[in-house]
Amino acid sequence: MPIHNADIAATFEEIADRLEIQGANPFRIRAYRNAARTLGELPQERALLEKGEDLTRLPGIGDDLAAKVREIVETGHCSLLDRLRRELPPAVTELLHIPGLGPKRVKVLYHELEVQTVEQLYRAARDGRIRALPGFGEKTELNILQTVEAHASQTRRFKLAVAAQYADALTAFLQTVPGVGQATLAGSFRRMRETVGDLDILVTAAAGSPVMQRFTAYDEVADVLSAGPTRASVMLKSGLQVDLRVVEAKSYGAALCYFTGSKAHNIAIRRIAQQRGLKVNEYGVFRGTERIAGEDEASVYRSVGLPFIPPELREDRGEIEAAHGGRLPNLVELADLRGDLHAHTQATDGHNSLREMALAAKALGLQYLAITEHSRHLTVAHGLDPLRLARQCDEIDQLNQELDGITLLKGIEVDILEDGSLDLPDDVLGRLDLVVGAVHSQFHLSRAKQTGRILRAMDHPHFTLLAHPSGRLIEQREPYDADMLRIIRHAKDRGCFLELNAHPDRLDLLDSQCQMAKEEGVLVSINSNAHSSFDFSNLKYGVG
Ligand code: DGT
Ligand code: CA
Ligand code: CA
């Protein structure tokens, strides 16, 4: 049975959650969380395990955790998790995904009200039984009620980086099936949306190819939702749905256009085709019964008088007009990136040394890397005070003399405090090559206060770059309320810049705001926010 890094990460996350509900030692809990993060973000799917490589060289993985990984890979089970699940019902961890419910509260709900599932939580809140619990209250009860109601109306979506682990393995598998020509991911995954609802895979196959049987029999399939000769849908054990289509080679381009979407983009293209007396569908472009295009995507666009439109733009947000007017933008490619202006080392909450980070960035073809540790206000991350920062600057100067082909820049990710002041004095910041400012607290300020706070921070003479400007965590935390257009315009006035944080949980500036920044003439820096040498591989999600 194939085990993905994301599966092992999920196992460790669940262990950490359950240990926390049980009130276990915080160091032990953190060890599992760190390991989950490390494994979940590994770029090479399973390669490390297959090569029998020493897992303990990974950050946060000691002998004990390495043995657990091996157990999971070899047996498909983790005996510690099995035991923890016997101690508390499996569904209890679902409650942790409700915003506002941490392990402490889940523990109380479970022990006082025997609440184990989201439905039971909803009923307890509706019946007014939660407000009386220690540490809760009427306001919390109302919040829970509203959150559960909002949750119920949303179906689960997968972060792009998580979906990628399943998608890459599955397409690689399909490519090994006899008779299969192309096996390509389409849908929102190909458009590089931040999250995907399901995976859409398109395959060309010779007659008689067993691709359908192999697909529905794939080890990770939990449930076959439908299966016919040319289309099938399955549910993977992870809860991710996959739709497969088998098409003829002569229809491949038309089908790829159709299943890449977006739906709105497709509808707009079909409308243009109709005006030209053409019919576009997943089999091709037709004038009457004559097929005039469809083998590749470019032929489909050509038939409606347009240049090829890259998948990332196909959202019907102006790309068709731009294509029509010859104004399609030249998209940034991963290979265009020269540097990265946001990274951490083990001096704070990162996992690797300065040298290891520099060499990893260089291996990816970057020419410069800014080291931007957290500042002292962020105590959970062991943020730097002026003395430790000065020491790091000396180390960077020294290292730069030795390093070849990459330059480390001296920076800081300084906390923007509630009043818009920065967490370190101006003279300390003045010694640095750049100052990255970030909001890490007080997410609930009013729009006016939050905006004012950020504008004031940008007024500092040494402020360079606003990190993860929206503050959102995908599927976990909404952006804070701030007037992004004003912030972008202020950045223009002050000569500073905004970040597009490439971490798969963040991906902000949001795409629409990047466009805003471009229109206002403000540069955006795609940064990894790397906490380990593996994290530079996330830059591709920022570019996407
Ligand atoms: P998702 O899965 O919610 O992240 O988003 P998509 O865009 O992958 O949507 P999905 O999986 O429902 O469908 C894949 C593509 O198939 C979609 O982007 C466009 C195409 N498609 C699906 N339904 C329709 C439809 O009713 N009309 C048209 N023109 N295209 C459709
Ligand atoms: Ca999809
Ligand atoms: Ca689909």
Image (cartoon, helix red, strand yellow):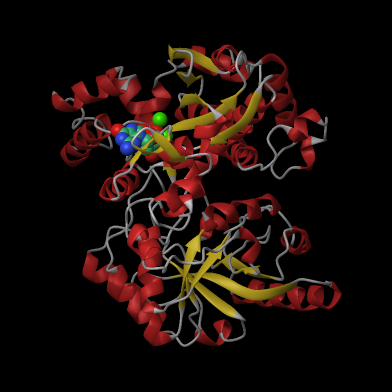
| Left or right relative to 410: residue 489 | left
Label tally: 0
| Left or right relative to 67: residue 371 | left
Q: Residue at x 30, y 24 (%)?
A: 118
Q: Give the x, y percent position of residue 92.
A: 40, 22
Q: Which quadrant, please, contains the N terminus?
A: top right
Above or below 251: residue 504: below
Q: Does residue 506 appear anywhere in the picture?
A: no
| Left or right relative to 100: residue 284 | right
Q: Give the x, y percent position of residue 485.
A: 30, 72
Where ligand 3 lies, by quadrant?
top left
Quarter of the image where one finds residue 62: top right
Quarter of the image where one finds residue 282: top left
| Left or right relative to 326: residue 410 | right
Above or below 144: residue 456: below
Q: Residue at x 35, y 58 (%)?
A: 320
Choose between 378 and 234: the one closer to the eye: 234
Quarter of the image where one finds residue 16: top right
Above or below 414: residue 333: above
Q: Give the x, y percent position of residue 395.
A: 76, 73
In the picture as drawn, the residue positioned furthest to the right comes out as 402
Q: Give the x, y percent position of residue 206.
A: 62, 21
Q: Does residue 33 appear anywhere in the picture?
A: yes
